Amino acid sequence: MATPLNGSIVKGFEILSLFTEQRQQIDSALVAENLQMNNATAHRLLMTLEQVGALRSIRRGTFALGPKIGRLGWLAEEANSIAAVVTPKLEALSGHLNESVMACRLSRYGPTCIAVANSRRAISVHIKVGTLLPLNRSAQGKLWLAQMSEPERVKRLSALTISDREAVVPNQMDDELHLIQRQGYAVNLGENEPDIAAISMPLKNKEGQMELSISVFGMLSRFDPEFVHQAKQQLEATIQQLQDKI
């Protein structure tokens, strides 16, 4: 059975879709006419969108797109732009290692895949753009944690689900993150999913801040020490090629 949709959210996006290059202002009468609702409902939805920053009031009863929409649009454009830059390199790396490769950005809840090159193997691990990975169990997540300041790390870990928080052993986690900081990469050998492994390295911007994690991932049985060493070398080469483009 399909999950029922939230009608208010659908209506909110329908209202936002009324904006065009030619129509940069809307009011409750326009919303009511186009979306077949009464003026009171249209006004309530408009006021709600204003309250959350999606719209801004320019005069009584008339609204334009708000600052939050601008920020989200900028983030979407930037993410798509970065994905377009990194994807050819991910595809080349995937072809060389014969395993899947992805790039992640850090979102509020953990690393999120923004670009991926899935392996062409008959039996392989595939992932979709938009997939969220756990902070404490994935190679990508642990790599991001190792780059954070102590206060931010504590804040991020405290926001985990109860089951994920219970899986964190403080001293063990600290030791692993210190090791990741020293060696410059993180591995996951079946910690997140029993039969899946990954190795992840940071792609930093010109200011030296981590912008993306670049990871090779696949079946655990293929990630022996020799392959991990080879993947590490190829990841370093790929990151070096991308360094000046981010």
Image (tube, rainbow, N blue to C red):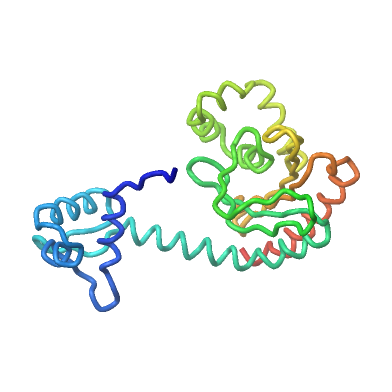
Horizontal and vertical percent for residue 185?
74, 43
- Write the residue at 27% across / 55% down: 12
Seen in the image, is 82 located left or right of residue 234? Answer: left
Seen in the image, is 92 located left or right of residue 34? Answer: right
All told, the count of numbered labels is: 0
**Residue 101 position by quadrant:** bottom right
Q: Nearer the viewer, residue 200 or 171?
A: 200
Horizontal and vertical percent for residue 110?
54, 41
- Write the residue at 88% across / 40% down: 225
Q: Nearer the viewer, residue 26 or 32?
A: 32
Q: Nearer the viewer, residue 169 or 116?
A: 116
Residue situated furthest right in the rendering = 226
The image shows residue 81, relative to residue 125, as above or below, that is below
Quadrant where the C terminus is found in the figure: bottom right
Seen in the image, is 160 located left or right of residue 209? Answer: left
Horizontal and vertical percent for residue 104?
61, 51
